[in-house]
Image (tube, rainbow, N blue to C red):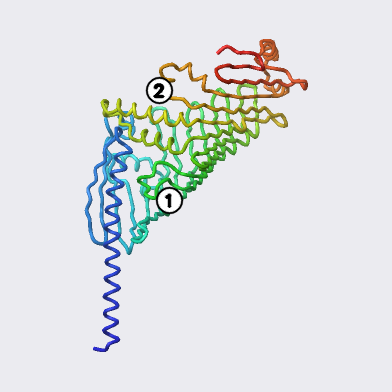
Amino acid sequence: MKKSMVAGVIGVLAASGIYLGGVYFSGQQASQYMETAMEKAQTAVQGQGFIHNEPQLGFFSSHYRITYTLASTSDEFAELLGTREVPFDVLVKHRFLGADSVVTLAEGELASKLKSVQANHAVAPISIESSQRFSPFSQQMSVDAVINTDKFVVKDDDSGDEATIGAVTLDYSQDGRDFTLDFVMQDSGIVGEDGQLAVQGISGTESGVLDHEDPFQALMAESLEALFNVKSIDLKTQEGDFAVNDLTLLVSQQPESDRMLTRVVYSAGSIDATKEEQTFSFNDANFGISFNLDTSATRGLVEQLNQLNPEDQEAMMQQMDALVGAADQLTLKGIQAQVEDLSVHQGELKAEANAALELAPFKVSDVMMMPTAAIQYLTLDATAQFPAAMVNQLDYNPKHIERMVDMGFLQKTPEGDYRAELKINKGEATLNGQPMPM
């Protein structure tokens, strides 16, 4: 046999050995990943249900039957689902240093119920397709997943009311601690004898960095940016109509030294309400609020919240003590909050408010014994202002506003608008500069 042929055979065998070794490694990693996932999932749902896993492990592929059984505390949810047991089938195909998996709802009462109301019987009601890549060198895992749910149409035979839950597509990717998430939900709504609700254009995107490389050990995001949109919400009833357009939610969380800065902003392009012959229209409505918290103390509080188990009453008492202790650690590091922009327009008119709040270090356990003592730790500076013309357009009795001015709750500006200022410092409060009893 020629040396080149021998070398070629050896090369093929070596490559095959490396490939099969990689497949074996990925199979082992997938099995370990699944075991860890089940342990973490059980911890997450403790007190709410129980998870049972039946694995059938193979060299090139593995199958898992995962059954989630609702606890006795979830009777109402079990009644809604029509069953206490929710089984899933997980098929994992091992490949070189990676695995592909498909998760579907297994046959059972819930699957039958969903199929009876889903729009497209040619697809699974719920499915998750994912691809995992394992690195034997960095011991890191990368995941790309797509979650799909079909459109569901539920009709009440007695009333004739019909609810539509739009199909959802969610894409998730994770590489080490970095993750991204994008989702889109099709139009949804309710049509009934008393009125109808239509929700259109639901979408969102999120990206960030987890606080741990292992997603099952991560408690929260170290940093994130998220944007959620709803094109329109339209409610029509016999009493009147209500519509919101271009609704958005912006969330930003960034670390700064040992603190965590979180900013949340709600906004709406327009808000319209009609009742009888009255119509109220607003535009460019905003509400922004930010928080400044200690990072390690926040993480400790989240960790304690995840460990709560309502099913075990004896353990629950100890867990509540630990939870209060974690809350103490958070408040002892000080809390700051700020309402950055609370405003709404009516044409060219604008009503607005803002506030800055700071809590000096204190113990939650002390305040629980005497709630009124919390005011001693609070510093607040809040102002609000709105034009008189906006009040007139709202068809509000101006005498009521003037009475509030006379009582000192509001002040009238030289331009004829209205404003109010509330300050709290070391247990003393002033409203528009006048002492206010607490």
- The image quarter in which residue 398 lies: top right
Residues at marks 1 and 2, CA–CA distance in whole angstroms: 35 Å
Looking at the figure, which quarter contains the N terminus? Answer: bottom left
Residue closer to the observer: 343 or 260: 260
Per the image, the residue denoted by label 2 is 365
Q: Few, some or many C-alpha atoms within 10 Å of disc 2 (few <14, some 14-19, many ≥20)?
A: some
Per the image, the residue denoted by label 1 is 177
| Residue 379, x across and y down, in percent | 57, 24
| SS class, disc 2 | helix
- Residue at image location 29% in from the left, 32% down from the top: 47
- The image quarter in which residue 297 lies: top left
Q: Is residue 432 above or below residue 282?
A: above
| Residue 347, x across and y down, in percent | 71, 31
Left or right relative to 112: residue 299: right
| Residue 162, x across and y down, in percent | 44, 34
Residue closer to the observer: 388 or 5: 5
| Amino acid type, residue under disc 1 in the picture | Arg
> Which comes before the other along the chain, label 1 or label 2?
1
| Residue 394, x across and y down, in percent | 67, 22
- Residue at image location 27% in from the left, 67% down from the top: 20
| SS class, disc 1 | loop
Q: Which mark is residue 208?
A: none
Looking at the figure, which quarter contains the C terminus? Answer: top right
Residue closer to the observer: 412 or 286: 412
Residue closer to the observer: 387 or 40: 40
Left or right relative to 298: residue 406: right
Q: Few, some or many C-alpha atoms within 10 Å of disc 1 (few <14, some 14-19, many ≥20)?
A: some
| Amino acid type, residue under disc 2 in the picture | Ser
Q: Is residue 231 above or below residue 436?
A: below
